[in-house]
Image (spheres, grey):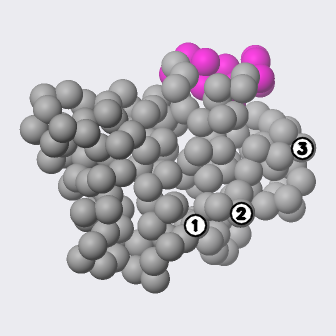
Amino acid sequence: MHAHNTVHERLKEARRALGYTQKTVAEAVGGKLRSWQDYESAKTLPGSQVLFGLANLGINVNWILTGEGPMWSAQAPAATGDTAAATVDEGILEDVLIVLREREQRTGRRLAPDREARLVAQIYQYICENEAGPTAEDRDRVRKLVQLVTGDVSE
């Protein structure tokens, strides 16, 4: 159990463990900077959209709300040490980001930051659960997943 006893303190701890600023975490969960600042300063509590966004980033929502259990959800990359820094396979993450940038150049359209963050997290999680590490086929699989999710099936 972590030393932080309030929802507000746990939100700040989760943001820091993710390596986000207040602005970037607000964007990643589909919220606004001012709202996130209000959460961390104990002025308001996050709603379901923010909690859903945190869950998509791998944060255990039960831990946010109650302080019970681990910070990272069972589907998140393994946490290490007291800081709960996630172990990330940079090769897989790079493949996902490369495919998204190629799509952006081809279509001239960029996903909203919250959708992009959720998409990256979901594809990364899928590949990590189904592969030991990045393979030559991963980029093709990522490309097909991105096409399916974004509706760019004609590519």
- Decide if residue 112 is in sight here: yes
Q: Is residue 128 magenta?
A: no
> Mark 3 against mark 1, which lies toward the viewer?
1
Front one among 54 and 99 = 99
* Residue that appears at 18% across and 38% down: 154
* Residue that appears at 61% across and 61% down: 76
Q: Amino acid at mark 1?
A: Pro
Looking at marks 2 and 3 on the same chain, the residue that comes earlier in the sequence is marked by 3
Location of mark 2 (residue): 74
**x, y (%) of residue 56?**
59, 45
Q: Relative to residue 98, is residue 92 depicted above or below?
A: below
Task: Report whether 98 appears left or right of 83.
Answer: left
Location of mark 1 (residue): 77
Chain part drawn in magenta: 33-45
Q: Quadrant of residue 133?
A: bottom left
Q: Amino acid at mark 3?
A: Thr
Distance from disc 2 to disc 3, alpha carbons, whole Å, reads: 17 Å
What secondary structure is marked by label 2? loop
Q: Main secondary structure of the magenta part?
A: helix
Front one among 131 and 51 = 131
Location of mark 3 (residue): 66
What secondary structure is marked by label 1? loop
Distance from disc 2 to disc 1, alpha carbons, whole Å, reads: 8 Å
Distance from disc 3 to disc 1, alpha carbons, whole Å, reads: 21 Å
Looking at the rendered image, the quarter that the C terminus falls into is: top left
Front one among 102 and 150 = 150
